[in-house]
Amino acid sequence: MQKKMLLSIVIPVYNVQNYLNECLDSVKNYDESQIEIILIDDGSTDKSSKICESYINNYMNTKYIRQENKGLSEARNVGIREAKGEYILFLDSDDYLYENILKKILDDLISDNLSNDIYLGRAYEFIDGEKKYKLCQIDYNLIENKSTPLDVFDKLNQDSNFWFAAWLIVIKRKFLLNNRLFFKVGIYHEDELWVPLVFMKASSIGFFNYGFYCYRKNRKDSIVSTPNIKREFDKLTIVEEFDKLNNFYNKRYDILSKRQAALIFGIILHIHEFKKNPNIKNLEEKIMKNICKLKYGKYKFVYYLIKILGIYNINKIITKFKLMN
């Protein structure tokens, strides 16, 4: 009897020749009848394409798609459309899965009868060039009694150690497609928009209370580590998208409002990096347009201080406080 395809691992690839082998090695030893690997080469100009081609020649149930550079969101969306597994797991090509973890993920999905829309896992963080792993995120045993995915999201939203990352979620493919949970194209921080929307749509949630993902921190050539004012504008785009979601779904306005406040606070933390940027005035205006959202959650005091002292003075105070700690 043919086994059911349980898991599609979607791996967008873009100019990661120094890291790609390690990523692909982490998904080598798997049950090829139950897992498929989907590689989407997003227009790489280094040796990433050759590495992908070498890999697919040696492993069954591996798809390789090469396209013009369209960004991470569209690469993931292509992978979603190609996927055939019951569930989808996203893996960034400069990261990798924990050693021999795929069997455990499959066993847990099967033992749970594939019953939940989403499963939430944990990640190990490590510094590029080192092998010292730190297990991150809250212990999910503390929140498993929460009744709905929204209640879980509310709890996680209050924990500064939780990452709003798509690769922490193993998501049921039919649930994703039925709710059109594709990634917004053309923005950075797409996960910040996608993850809350997934929680809002999901009816059920399960937990993998162990680290299955290895996240590479401080990669020298990573776009995440390079200051870019568009990233800050995109955070504000997400803030405005949350307004639309609140109006449309009318679900627990307080939850998304707290996330909006966290995003705006994050922009204020970095605004000094763009003081000489020609678009800084536009950014300041958009911040002030949305500044009232800081009144929700733990950033309320920042809202009132900004009204008195201004954005840059608050930035200096917060930066100095962080350095002292």
Image: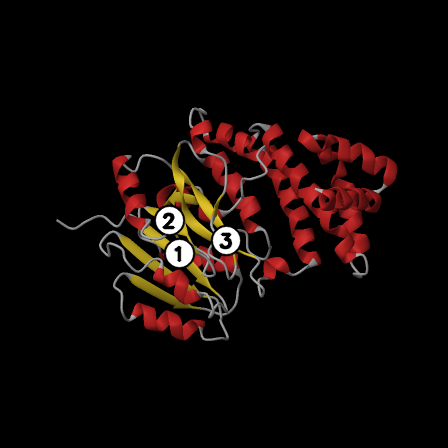
Q: Amino acid at mark 1?
A: Val
Judging from the image, what secondary structure is the residue with disc 1 in? Answer: strand
Query: To which quarter of the image does residue 245 belong?
Result: top right
- Which sits earlier in the primary sequence, circle 2 or circle 1? 1
Q: Name the image quarter holding residue 59.
A: bottom left
Callout 3 environment at 10 Å: few (<14), some (14 to 19), or many (20+)? some
**Residue 243 position within the rendered picture, expressed as x and y whole percent measured from the top left:** 64, 37
The circle on residue 88 is 2
Color style of the picture: secondary structure
Do the residues under discs 2 and 1 have CB atoms within 8 angstroms? yes
The numbered dot on residue 10 is 1
- Say if mark 2 contacts mark 3, CB within 8 Å: no
Task: Pick the residue in front: 317 or 176.
Answer: 317
Q: Residue furthest right?
A: 308
Identify which residue is drawn at 44% across, 33% down. Answer: 140
- Give amino acid for label 3: Phe
Q: Would residue 166 appear left or right of 231 to someone viewing this image?
A: left
Q: Is residue 143 at least partly visible in the picture? A: no
**Which amino acid is tagged 2?**
Ile
In the rendered image, is residue 29 in sight?
Answer: yes
Q: Which residue is disc 3 drawn over? A: 126
In the rendering, at what x and y percent does residue 235 appear? 65, 48
Q: In the picture, residue 186 is in which quadrant? A: bottom right
Dot 2, how many residues are within 10 Å of its Cα: few (below 14), some (14-19), or many (20+)?
Answer: many
